[in-house]
Image (cartoon, rainbow, N blue to C red):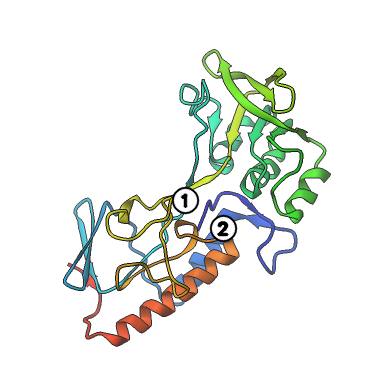
Amino acid sequence: MGAATDWVANFPGFPDGLSGFTLVERFRLQADRAGLVFAPAHIDRIRSHEMLFELEGGDQHWIARSAIIATGAYPVHLGVPGESKYRGRGVSYCATCDGPFFRGKEIAVIGGGDSAIQEAIYLSNLASRVTVIHRRALLRANQALQKIAFATPNIVFRWESILTEISGGENVTTIQTKSVTDGRLKSLDVQGVFLYVGLRPNSELVARLVDLDSQSAIITNPLMQTSVSGLFAAGDVRNTPLRQFVTSCADGAIAAQSALHFLERIESDPVRPS
């Protein structure tokens, strides 16, 4: 479903936007009231055997006739010098997770898509200044997010530039950028760097089970069915042209209905932990 930590400005019914965490929590409460059973677990392996799916995680084990994979996507790493060294010491990929540590400080956000601008807007409520560094002269984010970002006084932009290095002492103190037009190098004093230059589907759990595209996204048909009968996928983990909360919700509804119809077509027992 994507990062639930971002500021969501394009979900129907919330004209002022709200945090992804708040939206997901409301989803959970509504599902809870409808009787959905939650079983917190970290699933390490899914195996398919004789029209059954075995889900394993630690000492927990489930048997299911059908399953829906909705494991989302994770941010791509740039691989620039200093990125790995300062991860957790100024380099972050999650604004809500780490933003409060940078209250009153200067921050750089790398990227120009929806996720990058969402993070910049969220961080602008905490940081003294947020510099968005984007390799193009125009943002790729949707117009609603752009309007908010451009109207936020402590969000500034460094256009047509790429991040080339992150440096500092114990923590991040400086980044270096390079102009894509004339190659000029510039430094910028910041205490935090939030990178959001793309997402990679979190499909490793079923990589050996289902067909994936060249970006490791799960290939589905319009009914969210994967290449394995009874196994469905929804949200950012699948090959979708748009990754937003509203499309993920639609995927989930279709996948749930498809899974229900699949179960109705086969002789099955109630799904229960073994």
- Disc 1 secondary structure class: strand
Location of residue 139 in the rendering, given as x and y in whole percent from the top left corner:
73, 44
Instruction: Tell me: residue 184, above or below residue 112.
Output: above
Amino acid at pointer 1: Ala
Give residue 243's mark: 2
Q: Residues within 10 Å of mark 2 (few under 14, many from 20)?
A: many
Q: In which quarter of the image is the C terminus?
A: bottom left
Q: Which residue is drawn at 54% across and 12% down?
A: 169
**Could you tell whether 267 is left or right of 15 in the image?**
left
* CB-based contact (under 8 Å), mark 1 and mark 2: yes
**Could you tell whether 92 is left or right of 55 in the image?**
right
Amino acid at pointer 2: Arg
Instruction: Tell me: residue 19, above or below residue 165.
Output: below
Residue nearer the viewer, 113 or 256: 113
Name the residue carrying label 1.
Answer: 73
- Disc 2 secondary structure class: loop
